[in-house]
Every structure is written in C-alpha cells, then in structure tokens.
Amino acid sequence: MEKKSTFDLKLLKIILGTYILLAILIAGLNYGYARTAPENIASIITWVYLIYENWIKAAFILIGSFLTIKIIGSSKRTTMRKTNLIGFIIAALTVHIVIPLLVNNYDLYYYAMPLPWTTTPLQLLDTNSSLYISTISSWGTSGILSALAFFSAISLVVFIGTLLYGRRLQCSSICMFNGFAAEVFDPAIPLIGKRRMIKPRILRLMNILRWVFLGVALFFFAYWVMYLLGITITPNINTITKLESYKYLVGELMLNLLFWIAFIGRGYCHYCPLGTVLSGVARIAGQKIATNNSQCVQCNKCNETCPMSIDIKSKAINGENVQDIRCVGCGHCVDACPTKTLTYSTRFVEFYQNKRPSSNNS
C-alpha cells in the first residue's frame, strides 16, 4: 500500500512538473513570440495555447484529482478536501470543455474570474481594443456576446455563492487560476524540497502585497470604466493593456508557478485581488471556523495542515471562532482535527443545517 502511494505521489509530481513547463513554454510563446511572428506561425501558437488551456488543463485536473484522492486515502477524515476536488472537476469540465463546445468560443477561460481580477470584460466593450478585434475575428459577434454572458453568469454565481458559503465556493471549489492547483496537486507541492511553514515576516510581506495588488487591480478597473465613459487619462490604451499583461505574467503567473515549485500551493491566494474582495463579502456572510464542537487537545494538526498559515490552534484552545481574512474555506483543518472540534460554516450554512432536522421530522 505504501509503495502504491509513493508511486501515485511521484506520478502527481511529474504531472505538476509537466503542467508548469507547458505553462511557461506555451504562455511565453503566446504572449511573447506570437505577437511578432508571421501570421501562419502566430495562428498555430494560438491554436496550441487554446488546446493547452482547455483540454490539457482539464485533463490534468481530472487525473490529478483522482491521484490526490488515492493519496490522501479513505482512512482519514477527508470529506471537505474530496468535496473540493469534485468541485474543481465539475468546474474544469464546465469552463474548459462543455460551455466552449456549446457556444463555439474557446477563449471563455479569460472570463472565468470576476472583477477586479481582470479587466478583460471591460476591454471587450471597447470596439477599438485589441481584445475586441481579436475576439470578433476569431469567434464573431456571437463570441463577444457569449464571453460577456459567461462573465456575467460567473460573477453572479461567485458573489451570491460567497454570500451563502463564504470563500469556500470560489477559492476552494471553482477557481481555475490558483485554487485548483492548490487542491488538485496539494500532496505534490512544493515540487522541489519539503513544505515549510511561512515565517511571520513573510506573512507580513504577503499582507502588504495583498493591498498593493488590490490597489493595482482597482486602478486598471477604474481606468477602463472611465475610458468607456469617455474620460481619458492617457490616449494610449495599448500601454495600459501591456502593463496589465505584464502584471499578469510576472506578478501572477510566474510567481504562482514559483510557489508551486519551491514553496506552497496557496502562495498567490495571500494577495489575490479577487480573494481580498471576497474576504470582505465572506465577512458579511459570517464565514468562520467554529472551534467549540469538542475539547481541543492541542495536537497542532490544524495549524500544520492550514495552507494559509492561520493560527487556528490558539483560537481552538479557548473555543473561539476563527475569522481570518486569509481563510479560503478549504477545510483542511476541519478534516485534520482528530477530535472533530472544528466546523466550517456561514450564516446560511448554519440556517440550512438547523432547518434540515425539522423538515425531516415533518
């Protein structure tokens, strides 16, 4: 059994390594060389990028989820983690395969994250933007409409879902940027070396980055809103578009991959602009980790398994709720607790659980 688990872990690391190499190579070609390459070469690169971002990525998520479920096993309490993986499988099939096939638009993954994470939906409203021109030339008017409809639907689901279930829905069930890798490849991260706890000074730096990246994201959002309203800060929108692309490639994609290779899976989640906004929505929703179901035995397993380095134990000792801006609702601590002391909940979840027994009795 142990040899089988070791083989599964090695295979998972190979898949993660392959995914990272392809991400660097194909994204580099698509965002770099394709812009200056001959038209026939650029079209081939774009086609390969679409195949990679949709079919290959979805395949990695499915295979990785299956391997992770095998590795974490059925002997431990892994209910929340397995639910996360099921959510990501459904999200991957929906976002990368089913809907693109139905509407014949394979660029939809660009619109799978609500504002303020990216301004692509705002850019699509400008008929002079390079994004609008490339989209309409590739997918036609229906491609524009399907992208905007898809973005609106995703945004509605994410924000209403967060009001009901907290950050767990987006960050630990359907996020196709960092959330999926953190859960699907969790046993294989970091790819090199051993997993280490984040030191307090690094956490302080991450906290600064959180507000810096939110400020930058809001700047781009405000710029495009004003531009669409006819208020021009700078006439050269290409410069703004390039700056946002560099922000994505360097500050998000490359750092994201670095975290998977050498540090922790949830590194980007510490300063994700969307996550920061959703943490405020989750506070309204009453998201918390309750710690008073039984007596804490101070085993420290909750702290050891938390991918966001939240000090859960110090709250659990006194039976206090954990309400931290960093909590992504993954439930790793809940599954790891040997005395079932911890519970993830929101006001809606508590209401539903309280109403369910009475409805059963009736």
Image (cartoon, helix red, strand yellow):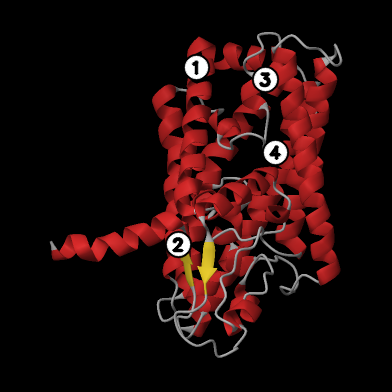
Check disc 4 and report its element: helix, strand or loop: helix
Badge 2: residue crowd in 10 Å (few <14, some 14–19, many ≥20): some
Badge 1: residue crowd in 10 Å (few <14, some 14–19, many ≥20): some
Residue 11 found in image quarter: bottom right
Task: Identify the mark at residue 145; answer none if there is no mark.
Answer: 1
Observer-nearest residue: 97 or 309? 309
For marks 2 and 3, give the one nearer the viewer. 3
- Residue type at mark 4 is Ile
Cα–Cα gap, marks 4 and 1: 27 Å
Left or right: where 11 falls relative to 214: left
Check disc 2 and report its element: helix, strand or loop: helix
Q: Residue furthest left?
A: 362
Q: Mark 2 points at which residue?
A: 66
Observer-nearest residue: 325 or 89? 325
Cα–Cα gap, marks 4 and 3: 23 Å
Cα–Cα gap, marks 1 and 2: 35 Å
Mark nearer the N terminus (1 vs 2)? 2
